[in-house]
Amino acid sequence: MLIFQLAVILLASKIAGDLSVKLGQPSVLGKLLIGIFLGPSVLGIVTNTDILKEISQIGVILLMFIAGLETDTEEFKRTGKASAFVGVSGIVVPFSLGYLAGMTIGLAPTESIFLGLLLSATSVSISVQALKEMGRLKSREGTTILGAAVIDDILVVIALAFVMSFAGGDVHLGTVVLKKVAFFAVAILLAWKVVPWVLKKFAPLRVTEAVISAGLMICFVYAYLAEYAGVAAIIGAYIAGVAISLTKYKHEITEKVETIGYSIFVPVFFTSIGVTAEFSGIAQHIGLIIGLSLLAIATKLAGSAIGAKLAGFSWRSSLGIGAAMVSRGEVALIIAAIGLESNLLQPELFSVIVVVVLVTTIVTPPMMKLFFHKPETGKQQKQ
């Protein structure tokens, strides 16, 4: 059954992606929508099995790994201040208004704080693909978005630990912060001393594709360490990509990882987001879904755009950066699952949040297209 589902996903995602491009939108939008069409909500051809989830997880890890490989480290250094502005302001606005929204709909103060944190989360995996297709990934805007996503993830997870410890959960804030500091310290040390050494040792091995195997090993180790430290695995994969981008093996690994990722794993990731959509029983909450969706989109767009403007970007670029930060993706879903388990999120509200996350993910690519103009490079982008 899995083999058939993979065949359907690959066929449908490529066709849908191409159609989306012909209609003037990023191909990722077509892949997201075709997932809804293939999933249980419409045709039911593809189901969200455990193994499909694992393949999807590899897909998003590889996508962020490629983003790291293609990052211009000098530009990354120059955009540090802008990333901080975007990351912080992109949390403050959604958190504040999310808290007020929670109190308005009758949630307890602690639950309202959790809702605010949930709306503050960002996942730029979708934005990364849209940036690649528009030739903007290596631009000042693209680098700022990636840096802001790292800052956003760290701050939201630390704030979440604080809320859960305050709410009586078995969470110690000091331990959470220490684990994250330790992860970034170890990640930097490995990037400086270990990553180049590993690649150098693997390069002369008389086996096929030794260098790409070493690159993938580094990627997965970083992703695992990040997840273990309570940082999203995609952040670890991104840092691994940046580390390898500083070595002479960057181009060889980038080319081959793109072939591996875009041939199977990344399409599965994009399509599986739509497949996970479950619309049964949400009709009674349609007003709340619309309200929270508009709130989620507007607050992240405005908050991040204000931060970008304060950092010196034009209004168009600022709104483009804000649009790229709108998608909540898998990061928000993970936080929502934690809230459900900790009784900080009611079961009926959890179902609503899942749909809201899907909405923010779907609207992100066309919003980015609106504010970012695709440069005339003459080079066909990967789909």
Image (cartoon, grey):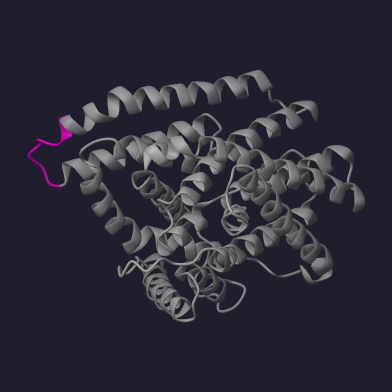
In the drawing, does residue 204 fall left or right of residue 366?
Answer: left
Q: Is residue 223 visible?
A: no
Q: Residue at x 34, y 56 (%)?
A: 261
Quadrant of image for the N terminus: bottom left
Task: Please state the horizontal and vertical placement of residue 304, each as a whole percent of the image.
Answer: 65, 48
- Magenta-highlighted residues: 201-208
Which corner quadrant of the image does residue 21 belong to? bottom left
Residues 33 and 120: in front is: 120
Residues 289 and 350: in front is: 289
Q: Is residue 207 visible?
A: yes
Q: Residue at x 77, y 64 (%)?
A: 289
Q: Is residue 202 within the magenta segment? A: yes
Is 290 rendered above or below residue 300? below
Most common SS among magenta residues: loop
Task: Please state the horizontal and vertical placement of residue 209, each as a whole percent of the image.
Answer: 16, 46
Task: Check the image and name the residue furthest to the left.
Answer: 206
Q: Residue at x 70, y 34 (%)?
A: 160
Which corner quadrant of the image does residue 11 belong to? bottom left
Task: Please state the horizontal and vertical placement of residue 64, each as a whole percent of the image.
Answer: 43, 48
In the drawing, does residue 227 fall left or right of residue 267?
Answer: right
Is 45 rendered above or below residue 156? below
